[in-house]
């Protein structure tokens, strides 16, 4: 047994010596990951502390209720359910509306016969992704302003609706503008998956008399199901992490009841408040991360049971 262990160690160090250049190449990325990904995790302790600046994180006293006081405060907060509901509505709405749109665009481009037309459409739908969030929200405000915006004045004059100030319409405005911005980028991965479909399957389907829709249903869609499942699992992990930049930029007093999500609430209590509460906001962020991890594991398990496809 000892001889076997010595032989294994000898082989390992021999391999390491022979390929040391490869390990040197990955050394810097590993250092960056440990510094910027694992190093800041020390700050998670804030969620369980009554933080005192003069004492620092480690020496600050533990919070009441076995360190869970900040979490209890969040769960008992009067707008906890409102923030949770708004976050789930926007996240699920974005997922179930955005993914099908990206798939439909990918399938449409895949069957477009004119190469120039296909590339032009792909470029036009891809370009909005590169618009910064603030500029993009500025475009939305210009278009839907009830006095000067083309769409805003139309809806205001004909339907009496102020879209920018409507709490009921905020989720739809957020999601569909996001789909317009990100649909082209989201379609790229499905276009790549469709490029890997064996053309012999299409030729066999054509010989059997299959129509275009039947080829999409029985050849293309089964081929991209693994990709769809993987993307769904990844999206479920971020279901509580609605990006606060766009929500915060689109937020106003009239739509606050639908636009206040967990991320914006955490931002306000930690950075905007007159008395920043860092332990409280850290607890909120940790809650989001834990729920995201649980949802990834659950979704992965369900996908594995139903389709035999899993990410982990």
Image (cartoon, rainbow, N blue to C red):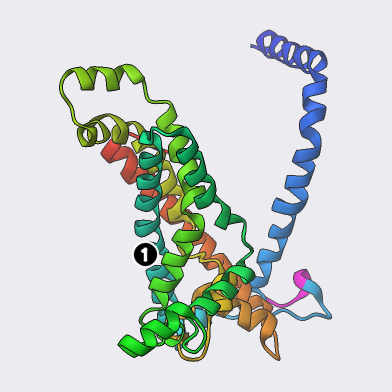
Task: Looking at the picture, tell me which residue is in the foreground, 116 or 212.
Answer: 116
Classify mark 1: helix, strand or loop.
helix
In the image, is residue 248 above or below residue 124?
Answer: below
Which residue range is magenta in the image?
A: 57-63
Q: Is residue 245 above or below residue 220?
A: below
Question: 95 or 83, which is in the foreground?
Answer: 95
Residue 312 visible in image: no
**Which part of the image, by quadrant, shows the N terminus?**
top right
Image side of residue 92 versus residue 36, left or right: left
Residue 169, image quadrant: bottom left
Q: Which of the two residues, 82 or 302, is positioned nearer the viewer here?
A: 82
Q: Which residue is mark 1?
A: 93
Q: Which residue does the image show at 57% across and 65% down from the upper left?
A: 286
> x%, y% of residue 167?
40, 84
Q: Residue at x 74, y 53 (%)?
A: 36
- Residue 19: give x, y in percent of width and height: 78, 17
Which residue is found at the position 80% from the left and 29% from the top?
25
């Amino acid at each position: 047994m000892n001889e076997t262990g010595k032989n294994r160690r000898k082989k390992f160090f021999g391999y390491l010596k022979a390929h040391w250049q490869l390990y040197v190449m990955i050394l810097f990325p590993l250092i960056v990951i440990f510094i910027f990904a694992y190093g800041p995790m020390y700050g998670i302790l804030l969620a369980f502390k009554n933080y005192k600046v003069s004492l620092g994180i480690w020496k600050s006293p533990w919070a009441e209720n076995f360190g869970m006081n900040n979490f209890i405060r969040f769960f008992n907060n009067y707008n906890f359910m409102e923030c949770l509901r708004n976050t789930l509505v926007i996240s699920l709405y974005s997922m179930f509306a955005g993914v099908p749109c990206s798939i439909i665009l990918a399938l449409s481009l895949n069957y477009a016969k004119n190469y120039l037309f296909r590339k032009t459409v792909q470029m036009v739908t891809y370009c909005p992704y590169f618009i910064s969030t603030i500029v993009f929200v500025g475009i939305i405000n210009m278009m839907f302003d009830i006095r000067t915006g083309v769409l805003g004045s139309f809806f205001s004059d004909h339907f009496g609706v102020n879209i920018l100030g409507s709490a009921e319409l905020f989720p739809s405005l957020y999601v569909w503008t996001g789909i317009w911005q990100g649909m082209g980028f989201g379609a790229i991965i499905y276009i790549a998956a469709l490029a890997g479909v064996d053309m012999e399957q299409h030729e066999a389907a054509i010989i059997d008399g299959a129509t275009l829709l039947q080829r999409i249903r029985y050849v293309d869609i089964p081929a991209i199901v693994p990709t769809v499942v993987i993307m769904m699992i990844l999206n479920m992990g971020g279901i509580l992490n609605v990006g606060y930049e766009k929500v915060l930029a689109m937020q106003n007093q009239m739509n606050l009841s639908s636009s206040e999500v967990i991320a914006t609430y955490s931002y306000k209590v930690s950075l905007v408040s007159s008395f920043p509460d860092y332990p409280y906001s850290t607890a909120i962020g940790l809650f989001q991360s834990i729920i995201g991890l649980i949802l990834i594991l659950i979704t992965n398990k369900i996908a594995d049971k139903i389709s035999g496809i899993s990410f982990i």
